[in-house]
Image: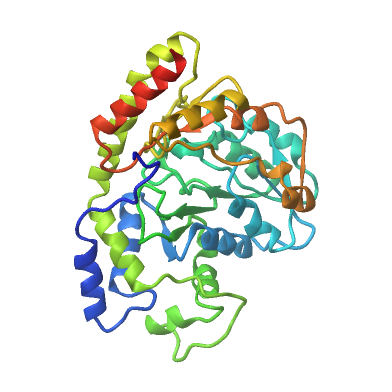
Amino acid sequence: MIPFNKPPLTGNEIHYITQALQGNKISGDGPFGQQCQTWFEQNLPAKKTLLTPSCTAALELAAILTDIQPGDEVIMPSYTFVSTANAFVLRGAKIVFVDIRSDTMNIDETLIEPAITEKTKAIVPVHYAGVGCEMDVIMDIADRHNLFVVEDAAQGMMSSYKGKSLGTIGHLGAFSFHETKNYTSGGEGGLLIVNDDTFKQRAEIIREKGTNRSQFFRGMVDKYQWVDVGSSYLPSELQAAYLWAQLKSAEKINETRLTAWEKYLFDLSDLEASGLIELPTLSEGCKHNAHMFYLKVANLEERSELIEFLKERNIMAAFHYVPLHTAVAGERFGRLHGDDKYTTAESERLVRLPLWYGITELDQNLVVDAIKEFYA
Protein backbone atom coordinates (compact mmCIF):
# COMPACT_ATOMS: atom_id res chain seq x y z
CA MET A 1 0.00 0.00 0.00
CA ILE A 2 1.32 3.43 -0.94
CA PRO A 3 -0.40 5.88 1.42
CA PHE A 4 -1.37 9.38 0.41
CA ASN A 5 0.57 10.88 3.32
CA LYS A 6 2.94 9.95 6.12
CA PRO A 7 3.59 12.45 8.92
CA PRO A 8 7.21 13.64 8.78
CA LEU A 9 9.52 12.00 11.29
CA THR A 10 13.18 13.00 11.67
CA GLY A 11 14.19 10.57 14.42
CA ASN A 12 14.86 13.16 17.14
CA GLU A 13 11.27 13.80 18.19
CA ILE A 14 11.31 11.34 21.10
CA HIS A 15 14.62 12.77 22.33
CA TYR A 16 13.26 16.32 22.59
CA ILE A 17 9.89 15.22 23.97
CA THR A 18 11.75 13.31 26.70
CA GLN A 19 13.73 16.45 27.50
CA ALA A 20 10.48 18.38 27.79
CA LEU A 21 8.97 15.75 30.10
CA GLN A 22 12.04 15.88 32.32
CA GLY A 23 11.82 19.66 32.60
CA ASN A 24 9.71 21.65 35.00
CA LYS A 25 7.26 23.04 32.43
CA ILE A 26 5.14 21.23 29.87
CA SER A 27 2.46 23.89 29.39
CA GLY A 28 2.73 26.58 26.71
CA ASP A 29 5.67 28.92 26.10
CA GLY A 30 8.30 26.70 27.70
CA PRO A 31 11.92 26.50 26.49
CA PHE A 32 11.08 24.54 23.33
CA GLY A 33 8.22 26.88 22.50
CA GLN A 34 10.53 29.88 22.82
CA GLN A 35 13.19 28.19 20.68
CA CYS A 36 10.69 27.46 17.92
CA GLN A 37 9.39 31.03 17.87
CA THR A 38 12.92 32.41 17.78
CA TRP A 39 13.73 30.07 14.88
CA PHE A 40 10.81 31.41 12.86
CA GLU A 41 11.60 35.03 13.69
CA GLN A 42 15.19 34.55 12.52
CA ASN A 43 14.66 32.30 9.52
CA LEU A 44 11.54 33.67 7.86
CA PRO A 45 12.31 36.38 9.14
CA ALA A 46 9.34 37.76 11.05
CA LYS A 47 8.80 40.53 13.59
CA LYS A 48 6.88 38.37 16.04
CA THR A 49 5.65 34.78 16.01
CA LEU A 50 3.34 32.95 18.39
CA LEU A 51 2.83 29.19 18.39
CA THR A 52 -0.80 28.10 18.48
CA PRO A 53 -2.56 24.73 18.85
CA SER A 54 -3.60 24.83 15.18
CA CYS A 55 -3.75 27.06 12.12
CA THR A 56 -7.46 27.39 12.90
CA ALA A 57 -6.53 28.96 16.25
CA ALA A 58 -4.06 31.30 14.54
CA LEU A 59 -6.78 32.45 12.11
CA GLU A 60 -9.23 32.96 14.97
CA LEU A 61 -6.61 35.07 16.73
CA ALA A 62 -6.18 37.11 13.56
CA ALA A 63 -9.95 37.66 13.32
CA ILE A 64 -10.01 39.02 16.87
CA LEU A 65 -6.95 41.22 16.30
CA THR A 66 -8.45 42.78 13.18
CA ASP A 67 -11.58 43.53 15.22
CA ILE A 68 -14.01 41.71 12.95
CA GLN A 69 -17.55 42.67 13.96
CA PRO A 70 -20.99 41.33 13.01
CA GLY A 71 -21.85 42.57 9.54
CA ASP A 72 -18.26 43.05 8.38
CA GLU A 73 -17.31 41.44 5.08
CA VAL A 74 -14.17 39.39 4.48
CA ILE A 75 -13.01 38.52 0.96
CA MET A 76 -11.39 35.14 0.29
CA PRO A 77 -11.38 32.32 -2.28
CA SER A 78 -14.03 29.63 -2.03
CA TYR A 79 -11.40 27.00 -2.81
CA THR A 80 -9.92 26.61 0.68
CA PHE A 81 -10.33 24.71 3.92
CA VAL A 82 -13.30 25.55 6.11
CA SER A 83 -11.13 27.11 8.86
CA THR A 84 -10.26 30.03 6.58
CA ALA A 85 -13.91 31.09 6.62
CA ASN A 86 -14.93 29.78 10.05
CA ALA A 87 -12.48 31.99 11.93
CA PHE A 88 -14.22 35.11 10.64
CA VAL A 89 -17.76 33.72 10.66
CA LEU A 90 -17.33 33.12 14.40
CA ARG A 91 -16.89 36.89 14.80
CA GLY A 92 -20.08 37.56 12.84
CA ALA A 93 -18.55 38.34 9.45
CA LYS A 94 -20.15 37.71 6.09
CA ILE A 95 -17.75 35.87 3.78
CA VAL A 96 -17.48 37.15 0.22
CA PHE A 97 -16.10 34.44 -2.03
CA VAL A 98 -14.40 35.29 -5.32
CA ASP A 99 -13.20 33.03 -8.10
CA ILE A 100 -9.73 31.52 -8.37
CA ARG A 101 -7.13 31.52 -11.12
CA SER A 102 -7.11 28.33 -13.16
CA ASP A 103 -3.31 28.18 -13.28
CA THR A 104 -2.31 28.36 -9.60
CA MET A 105 -5.68 27.67 -7.90
CA ASN A 106 -5.07 30.87 -5.89
CA ILE A 107 -7.50 33.75 -5.50
CA ASP A 108 -7.84 35.79 -8.68
CA GLU A 109 -6.34 39.09 -7.59
CA THR A 110 -8.14 40.97 -10.37
CA LEU A 111 -11.53 40.08 -8.85
CA ILE A 112 -10.84 41.36 -5.34
CA GLU A 113 -11.34 45.09 -5.85
CA PRO A 114 -14.74 44.73 -7.58
CA ALA A 115 -15.93 42.71 -4.55
CA ILE A 116 -15.09 45.46 -2.04
CA THR A 117 -17.98 47.30 -0.39
CA GLU A 118 -18.23 49.78 2.47
CA LYS A 119 -18.56 46.76 4.76
CA THR A 120 -15.33 45.08 3.68
CA LYS A 121 -12.82 44.72 6.53
CA ALA A 122 -10.20 42.23 5.37
CA ILE A 123 -8.79 40.16 2.51
CA VAL A 124 -7.64 36.60 3.19
CA PRO A 125 -5.46 35.21 0.37
CA VAL A 126 -4.78 31.48 0.57
CA HIS A 127 -1.43 30.28 -0.77
CA TYR A 128 -2.54 27.02 -2.34
CA ALA A 129 0.03 24.20 -2.43
CA GLY A 130 2.63 26.57 -1.02
CA VAL A 131 2.59 28.76 -4.15
CA GLY A 132 2.23 32.44 -3.35
CA CYS A 133 -0.71 34.60 -4.39
CA GLU A 134 0.01 37.87 -6.21
CA MET A 135 0.74 39.70 -2.97
CA ASP A 136 1.99 42.97 -4.52
CA VAL A 137 -1.40 43.50 -6.13
CA ILE A 138 -3.30 42.38 -3.04
CA MET A 139 -1.34 44.64 -0.68
CA ASP A 140 -1.81 47.60 -3.03
CA ILE A 141 -5.57 47.04 -3.03
CA ALA A 142 -5.59 46.73 0.76
CA ASP A 143 -3.55 49.91 1.22
CA ARG A 144 -5.80 51.94 -1.05
CA HIS A 145 -8.99 50.72 0.65
CA ASN A 146 -7.62 50.63 4.21
CA LEU A 147 -8.18 46.88 4.59
CA PHE A 148 -6.37 44.23 6.60
CA VAL A 149 -4.64 41.32 4.87
CA VAL A 150 -4.46 38.00 6.70
CA GLU A 151 -2.40 35.44 4.80
CA ASP A 152 -3.60 31.87 5.12
CA ALA A 153 -0.19 30.29 4.61
CA ALA A 154 -1.21 26.95 6.13
CA GLN A 155 0.60 25.13 3.31
CA GLY A 156 3.33 27.71 2.79
CA MET A 157 6.14 27.20 5.30
CA MET A 158 9.51 27.65 3.54
CA SER A 159 7.83 29.17 0.45
CA SER A 160 8.36 32.74 -0.71
CA TYR A 161 6.99 35.44 -2.99
CA LYS A 162 9.57 37.73 -4.61
CA GLY A 163 12.07 36.93 -1.88
CA LYS A 164 9.65 37.38 1.04
CA SER A 165 8.48 34.40 3.07
CA LEU A 166 4.79 33.66 2.75
CA GLY A 167 2.96 34.77 5.87
CA THR A 168 5.27 37.76 6.40
CA ILE A 169 3.77 40.07 3.76
CA GLY A 170 0.26 40.83 5.02
CA HIS A 171 -0.60 42.37 8.38
CA LEU A 172 -0.91 38.87 9.85
CA GLY A 173 -0.13 35.34 8.69
CA ALA A 174 -1.16 31.86 9.78
CA PHE A 175 0.66 28.54 9.35
CA SER A 176 -0.34 24.94 10.00
CA PHE A 177 1.70 22.14 11.54
CA HIS A 178 -0.95 19.49 11.01
CA GLU A 179 0.38 16.02 10.25
CA THR A 180 -0.36 16.51 6.54
CA LYS A 181 1.93 19.54 6.33
CA ASN A 182 5.65 19.61 5.55
CA TYR A 183 6.46 20.10 9.24
CA THR A 184 4.31 19.00 12.18
CA SER A 185 4.19 19.55 15.91
CA GLY A 186 2.91 16.08 16.66
CA GLY A 187 -0.20 15.93 14.51
CA GLU A 188 -1.72 19.35 15.22
CA GLY A 189 -0.27 22.82 15.58
CA GLY A 190 -0.07 26.30 14.13
CA LEU A 191 1.69 29.64 14.13
CA LEU A 192 0.56 33.26 14.03
CA ILE A 193 2.86 35.72 12.28
CA VAL A 194 2.50 39.31 13.45
CA ASN A 195 3.87 41.76 10.89
CA ASP A 196 2.08 44.90 12.09
CA ASP A 197 3.63 46.35 15.25
CA THR A 198 0.26 47.60 16.45
CA PHE A 199 -0.85 44.00 16.97
CA LYS A 200 2.19 42.64 18.82
CA GLN A 201 1.20 43.32 22.42
CA ARG A 202 -2.50 42.54 22.02
CA ALA A 203 -1.74 39.26 20.23
CA GLU A 204 0.07 38.00 23.33
CA ILE A 205 -2.82 39.03 25.57
CA ILE A 206 -5.55 37.42 23.46
CA ARG A 207 -3.50 34.23 23.19
CA GLU A 208 -3.11 34.14 27.00
CA LYS A 209 -6.87 34.06 27.66
CA GLY A 210 -7.07 37.86 27.68
CA THR A 211 -4.46 38.30 30.42
CA ASN A 212 -1.13 40.13 30.46
CA ARG A 213 0.67 37.10 31.86
CA SER A 214 3.47 37.26 29.28
CA GLN A 215 4.28 40.80 30.37
CA PHE A 216 4.26 39.65 34.00
CA PHE A 217 6.78 36.89 33.29
CA ARG A 218 9.04 39.44 31.58
CA GLY A 219 8.82 41.69 34.65
CA MET A 220 6.92 44.43 32.82
CA VAL A 221 4.00 44.40 35.32
CA ASP A 222 3.96 43.44 39.01
CA LYS A 223 0.94 41.12 38.60
CA TYR A 224 -1.07 39.74 35.74
CA GLN A 225 -4.78 40.14 35.33
CA TRP A 226 -7.64 39.92 32.85
CA VAL A 227 -7.31 42.90 30.51
CA ASP A 228 -8.97 41.95 27.21
CA VAL A 229 -10.98 39.28 25.40
CA GLY A 230 -9.07 36.12 24.69
CA SER A 231 -8.91 32.36 24.74
CA SER A 232 -6.44 29.54 25.32
CA TYR A 233 -4.35 29.62 22.17
CA LEU A 234 -1.12 28.07 23.50
CA PRO A 235 0.16 24.64 22.44
CA SER A 236 1.83 22.41 25.01
CA GLU A 237 5.58 22.15 25.41
CA LEU A 238 5.38 18.57 24.10
CA GLN A 239 4.04 19.86 20.78
CA ALA A 240 6.82 22.44 20.64
CA ALA A 241 9.45 19.79 21.40
CA TYR A 242 8.20 17.65 18.52
CA LEU A 243 8.23 20.68 16.22
CA TRP A 244 11.75 21.61 17.30
CA ALA A 245 13.02 18.29 15.96
CA GLN A 246 11.37 19.07 12.63
CA LEU A 247 12.84 22.58 12.48
CA LYS A 248 16.34 21.22 13.11
CA SER A 249 15.90 19.23 9.89
CA ALA A 250 13.85 21.83 8.01
CA GLU A 251 16.25 22.25 5.11
CA LYS A 252 16.64 18.50 4.64
CA ILE A 253 12.87 17.98 4.67
CA ASN A 254 12.40 20.79 2.17
CA GLU A 255 15.09 19.57 -0.21
CA THR A 256 13.82 15.98 -0.09
CA ARG A 257 10.26 17.00 -0.88
CA LEU A 258 11.38 19.26 -3.73
CA THR A 259 13.36 16.38 -5.25
CA ALA A 260 10.28 14.15 -5.13
CA TRP A 261 8.10 16.93 -6.58
CA GLU A 262 10.51 17.47 -9.47
CA LYS A 263 10.56 13.74 -10.18
CA TYR A 264 6.78 13.64 -10.57
CA LEU A 265 6.93 16.70 -12.82
CA PHE A 266 9.56 15.15 -15.07
CA ASP A 267 8.07 11.64 -15.17
CA LEU A 268 4.57 12.87 -16.03
CA SER A 269 5.59 15.55 -18.51
CA ASP A 270 4.99 13.28 -21.51
CA LEU A 271 1.33 12.84 -20.51
CA GLU A 272 0.98 16.61 -20.33
CA ALA A 273 2.67 16.99 -23.71
CA SER A 274 0.09 14.57 -25.11
CA GLY A 275 -2.72 16.72 -23.74
CA LEU A 276 -3.99 14.02 -21.38
CA ILE A 277 -3.31 15.87 -18.10
CA GLU A 278 -2.21 19.26 -16.80
CA LEU A 279 0.61 19.68 -14.29
CA PRO A 280 1.11 22.39 -11.61
CA THR A 281 1.93 25.96 -12.59
CA LEU A 282 4.29 28.18 -10.59
CA SER A 283 3.86 31.93 -10.55
CA GLU A 284 6.79 34.14 -11.56
CA GLY A 285 8.84 35.15 -8.54
CA CYS A 286 7.45 32.36 -6.35
CA LYS A 287 9.59 29.75 -4.63
CA HIS A 288 7.46 26.85 -3.47
CA ASN A 289 7.98 24.15 -0.82
CA ALA A 290 6.66 21.05 -2.61
CA HIS A 291 3.76 20.85 -0.20
CA MET A 292 1.75 18.80 -2.66
CA PHE A 293 1.90 17.46 -6.17
CA TYR A 294 -1.31 17.47 -8.12
CA LEU A 295 -2.39 16.91 -11.68
CA LYS A 296 -5.59 17.89 -13.47
CA VAL A 297 -7.63 15.52 -15.57
CA ALA A 298 -10.42 16.18 -18.07
CA ASN A 299 -13.42 16.24 -15.73
CA LEU A 300 -15.02 14.91 -12.54
CA GLU A 301 -15.87 11.52 -14.06
CA GLU A 302 -12.30 10.93 -15.19
CA ARG A 303 -10.99 12.01 -11.78
CA SER A 304 -13.19 9.49 -10.00
CA GLU A 305 -12.11 6.75 -12.40
CA LEU A 306 -8.40 7.56 -11.96
CA ILE A 307 -8.60 7.64 -8.15
CA GLU A 308 -10.44 4.30 -8.15
CA PHE A 309 -7.94 2.84 -10.64
CA LEU A 310 -5.05 3.82 -8.37
CA LYS A 311 -6.85 2.49 -5.29
CA GLU A 312 -7.21 -0.92 -6.97
CA ARG A 313 -3.43 -0.90 -7.28
CA ASN A 314 -2.99 0.01 -3.60
CA ILE A 315 -2.13 3.63 -4.30
CA MET A 316 -3.99 6.24 -2.30
CA ALA A 317 -4.61 9.46 -4.23
CA ALA A 318 -7.11 12.16 -3.23
CA PHE A 319 -9.03 15.17 -4.46
CA HIS A 320 -9.16 18.34 -2.38
CA TYR A 321 -11.68 20.95 -1.20
CA VAL A 322 -15.33 21.07 -2.14
CA PRO A 323 -15.77 24.82 -2.85
CA LEU A 324 -17.09 26.53 0.27
CA HIS A 325 -19.67 28.64 -1.54
CA THR A 326 -21.45 25.42 -2.60
CA ALA A 327 -21.59 24.01 0.93
CA VAL A 328 -24.61 24.33 3.21
CA ALA A 329 -22.73 26.55 5.68
CA GLY A 330 -21.10 28.48 2.86
CA GLU A 331 -24.49 29.45 1.47
CA ARG A 332 -25.62 30.45 4.96
CA PHE A 333 -22.61 32.48 6.03
CA GLY A 334 -21.26 33.75 2.72
CA ARG A 335 -22.01 34.79 -0.82
CA LEU A 336 -20.25 34.47 -4.13
CA HIS A 337 -19.32 37.72 -5.86
CA GLY A 338 -19.18 37.40 -9.60
CA ASP A 339 -19.08 34.18 -11.59
CA ASP A 340 -17.83 30.74 -10.60
CA LYS A 341 -15.82 30.39 -13.78
CA TYR A 342 -13.01 28.24 -12.44
CA THR A 343 -13.48 27.34 -8.75
CA THR A 344 -15.87 24.41 -9.15
CA ALA A 345 -14.69 23.24 -12.57
CA GLU A 346 -11.00 23.22 -11.64
CA SER A 347 -11.61 21.67 -8.22
CA GLU A 348 -13.40 18.74 -9.88
CA ARG A 349 -10.39 18.03 -12.11
CA LEU A 350 -7.68 18.03 -9.46
CA VAL A 351 -6.01 14.85 -8.15
CA ARG A 352 -3.33 14.91 -5.46
CA LEU A 353 -0.63 12.25 -5.59
CA PRO A 354 1.19 10.59 -2.67
CA LEU A 355 3.97 12.86 -1.41
CA TRP A 356 5.72 12.92 1.95
CA TYR A 357 9.14 13.30 3.51
CA GLY A 358 10.89 10.00 2.80
CA ILE A 359 8.83 8.75 -0.14
CA THR A 360 11.04 6.47 -2.20
CA GLU A 361 11.76 6.56 -5.91
CA LEU A 362 10.29 3.05 -6.12
CA ASP A 363 6.98 4.26 -4.68
CA GLN A 364 6.93 7.22 -7.06
CA ASN A 365 7.72 4.96 -10.02
CA LEU A 366 4.78 2.74 -9.09
CA VAL A 367 2.49 5.77 -8.93
CA VAL A 368 3.68 7.12 -12.28
CA ASP A 369 3.48 3.71 -13.96
CA ALA A 370 -0.09 3.25 -12.73
CA ILE A 371 -1.13 6.66 -14.05
CA LYS A 372 0.42 5.89 -17.43
CA GLU A 373 -1.31 2.51 -17.46
CA PHE A 374 -4.63 4.27 -16.84
CA TYR A 375 -4.13 6.57 -19.82
CA ALA A 376 -2.81 3.77 -22.02
Q: How many marks?
A: 0
Residue at left 60%, top 64%? Answer: 65
Near-viewer residue (45 or 253) = 253
Work out whether residue 120 can be spotted: no
Give the residue at x 75% y 34%.
114
Q: Residue 86: image x %, image y %?
A: 65, 57
Say which of 338 and 168 sits in front: 338
Whole-percent x, y for residue 190 in the image: 45, 59
Question: Residue sitting at 73 percent across and 31 percent down?
Answer: 340
In the rendered image, residue 261, in percent from the top left (x then y), is placed at: 34, 31
Left or right of 309, for residue 148: right
In the rendered image, the vertical position of residue 109 relative to residue 226, given as above or below: above
Give the side of residue 33 with respect to residue 120, left or right.
left
Which residue is at the front of the view, 334 or 117?
Answer: 334
Quadrant assignment for the C terminus: top left
Is 197 placed left or right of 366 in the picture? right
Q: In the orientation shown, which residue stands out farthest toward the top?
A: 274
Specify the quadrant of the image occupied by residue 1: top left
Asked whether residue 86 appears in the rendered view, the answer is yes
Q: Residue at x 27, y 48 (%)?
A: 250
> Which percent across, then down, holds residue 366?
31, 27
